[in-house]
Amino acid sequence: MSDSATKTSPLHERHVALGAKMADFGGWSMPIEYQGGGVVAEHTAVRERVGLFDVSHLGNASVSGPGAKDFLNRCLTNDLDRIQPGQAQYTTCCAEDGGVVDDMIAYLRSEEEVLLIPNAANTATVVRLLQEAPDRPEEVVVEDQHEDYAILALQGPRVDEVMEAVGLPTGHGYMSFVEARRDGVPVTVCRTGYTGERGYELVCAVADAPALWDALMAAMGPVDGLACGLGARDTLRTEMGYALHGNELSPQITPVMARTGWAVGWGKPAFWGRERLVAQKEAKESRLSGGLVVTGRGIPRAGCRVLDQDGREVGTVTSGTFSPTRRQGVALALLDRGVQQGDALVVDVRGREVPVEVAKPPFVSGGAAG
C-alpha cells in the first residue's frame, strides 16, 4: 500500500489490468466499476450468481488484553455479551451527543481479543478515541492495523461453490467467522457482507491478497462471476436499505434517527452517547430514516428535499440510486414522523418534482442470512 496522500490497495495493479475506473474513496484509490458491463452488470452478477469486491480500504483495528471485550462494551453501542467467541456483531461508535463517529463490525475472537472493521476515513479516529478513553485499562492495547490486512468480499447465491473450489470453509452461520488456512496462509473467513446476498468477507495479510484474488477470480469463471467495484456495492446496499456512514449515519444522524436501534444495547449501564440516545428515543421527536420508491421518472440523490403534496418539506434524501433489480429509482431519506408508509410525496431533483411513494426497505429480497 502507498504512503502517499491517496492510498492504494495491494490489488491495485489487478484493478488497473481489468480496466477499472478508479476513484478516491475515503482517501483510497478504489475501483468504482470495470470494463465489460459496468455497475449494472456487476450488480446483476451478485444478485444472480457471484461477485468479488476488493474492500481493503476498510479499516482494521485490534483491541486486546485482559478485559478487552468488557472495555469495548463500555464504549460501543451494541452489547458484546449477546454473542460468543467466533461471532461478529454490527455496532456503532457514538459521540457523547449521540452522533455516530462510525459504524463497524466487531469480531469477538475471545474475551481478550476483538477485531474491529471500521470505515476507511474513520479508522484513525475510532482508534484514537479508544486509546484515549479514560477508563481503558492499561493492559488493554488498541492497535491500528489498517494497512497490515486486505479484505475481499465474495457475495452472491453461488458463493459457496467458489469458496469450496479454492479450499476455503463454507456453511458456518451468518455473522460468524472461522480462522482458516489456504495453502498454509491464514485467512479469516467471515459470513458477513454488505449486499444482502449470501457471502463471505476474507481478511488476510496484505502480501497474501494478490494470490487469493487470483484464485477466486479463476474459480468464479465457471459460474460467470465478475469482479465488482464500489459502484455496485452502493446500489446493492441501497436496495437492501443498509445504512452508509456519511449518508444514513453521521455525527448529525444518530442510531435512533437511522432506525439502527437494534444495534444498541439499551439495557447496558454505559456506552458512549447513552444518555442522549435514551432521551432522543423517549422524546419521539426526531426525523426517522425511511424508504422511497419512484413512481414516475427520475432518480433521487442525496441532499434532495422531500415534499408533501402541498409543497411542504417533510424530509431529506440521504441516499438515492437507480435500482438495477427493480428498474426504477429508490432512495433512503430522513422523514418527519408524520409521514406514513404508502404516502405519495415528491422529491425535488434540481427543480424537477419526481413522484415517490413511501416504502419500507428492503426494496428487494436478499438471501444474506441463508
Image (spheres, grey):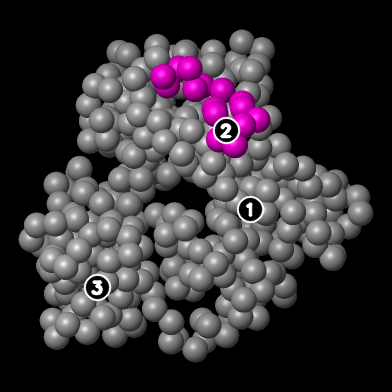
Q: Which residue is mark 1?
A: 83
Amino acid bearing label 3: Val
State the image coordinates of residue 43 (x, y, percent, origin top left). 28, 36
Report helix, strand or loop for mark 2: strand
Magenta residues, as a range? 1-16
Which of discs 2 and 3 lies nearer the camera? The answer is 2
Q: Which callout, 2 or 1, points to the residue nearer the camera?
A: 2
Please say whether residue 223 is visible from this viewpoint: yes
**What is the quadrant of the N terminus in the image?**
top right
Q: Which residue is denoted by mark 3 in the rendering?
A: 306
Closer to the N terminus: mark 2 or mark 1? 2
Relative to residue 102, is residue 184 depicted above or below? above
Q: Secondary structure at mark 1?
A: loop
Left/right placement of residue 17 relative to residue 83 reads left
Tell me which numbered mark, 3 or 1, is placed earlier along the sequence: 1
Element on which disc 3 rests: strand
**The stretch drawn in magenta includes residue 14:** yes
Quadrant holding the C terminus: top left
Residue placed farthest to the right in the image?
Answer: 138
Q: In this orientation, which residue lies closer to the viewer: 272 or 302?
A: 302
Observer able to see residue 181: no
Q: Are marks 2 and 1 in contact (CB under 8 Å)?
A: no
Residue 273 position within the rendered picture, expressed as x and y whole percent measured from the top left? 65, 73
The earlier-in-sequence mark between 2 and 3 is 2
Q: Is residue 291 left or right of residue 191?
A: left
256 shown above or below 240: below
Q: Nearer the viewer, residue 43 or 300?
A: 300
